[in-house]
Image (cartoon, rainbow, N blue to C red):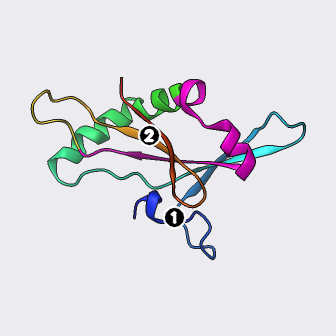
């Protein structure tokens, strides 16, 4: 189930995993970083996504996300950062990767998205 349709803490029911706790700007405070399960295509298209992930695509995207995309003001207000990687598979025409990183709030509302460059 996509993160946008589920609150992060719904009576303890979430598939998100805690990745890390990172220091916030507030002295002594930390932000918890949660990652939702990846939403990837099925069948042959998933093998392309698997190769991209194995080659470090998600790591590159998360690096860009920290520098350019993370909605830190909202994250500090909620005390956490919630992300999800998703892809519908390579485009049929250009064969380009369509991996996307999305940041959600605790209620599953989209805060921002970033795509492969």
List the single residue furthest toward the left.
Answer: 93
| Residue 17 percent across, percent down from the top left | 57, 56
Is disc 1 placed on a helix, strand or loop? Answer: loop
Residue drawn at x 45%, y 58% is: 4
* Left or right relative to 80: residue 105: left
User: Observer-nearest residue: 26 or 59?
Assistant: 26
Residue drawn at x 32%, y 33% is: 52
Is disc 2 placed on a helix, strand or loop? Answer: strand
User: Observer-nearest residue: 73 or 21?
Assistant: 73
Residue drawn at x 52%, y 58% is: 108
Q: Is residue 81 magenta?
A: yes
| Residue 6 percent across, percent down from the top left | 49, 66
In the figure, 32 relative to 113: above or below?
Answer: below
* Left or right relative to 57: residue 110: right
Whether residues under marks 1 and 2 lie with C-beta atoms below 8 angstroms apart, the answer is no
Q: Is residue 77 magenta?
A: yes
Q: Quadrant of the C terminus?
A: top left
Q: Quadrant of the N terminus?
A: bottom left
Q: Which residue is mark 1?
A: 15
In the figure, 3 relative to 19: above or below?
Answer: below
| Residue 45 percent across, percent down from the top left | 19, 45
Q: Nearer the viewer, mark 1 or mark 2?
A: 2
Categorize mark 2 by other alpha carbons within 10 Å: few (<14), some (14-19), many (20+).
many
Categorize mark 1 by other alpha carbons within 10 Å: few (<14), some (14-19), many (20+).
some
Disc number placed over residue 101 in the picture, else none: 2
**Separation (CA) of disc 1 from disc 2:** 17 Å
| Residue 14 percent across, percent down from the top left | 55, 67
* Left or right relative to 5: residue 31: right
Q: Which residues are magenta?
A: 65-88
Chain-order first, disc 1 or disc 2: 1
């Amino acid at each position: 189930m996509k993160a946008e349709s589920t609150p992060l803490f719904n009576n303890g029911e979430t598939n998100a995993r805690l990745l890390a706790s990172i220091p916030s700007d507030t002295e002594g405070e930390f932000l918890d970083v949660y990652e939702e399960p990846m939403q990837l295509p099925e069948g042959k298209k998933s093998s392309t996504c698997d190769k991209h992930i194995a080659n470090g695509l998600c790591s590159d995207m998360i690096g860009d996300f920290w520098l350019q995309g993370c909605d830190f003001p909202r994250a500090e207000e909620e005390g956490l950062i919630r992300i999800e990687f998703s892809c519908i598979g390579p485009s049929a025409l250009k064969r380009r990767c369509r991996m996307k990183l999305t940041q959600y709030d605790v209620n599953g509302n989209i805060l921002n998205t970033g795509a492969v460059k």
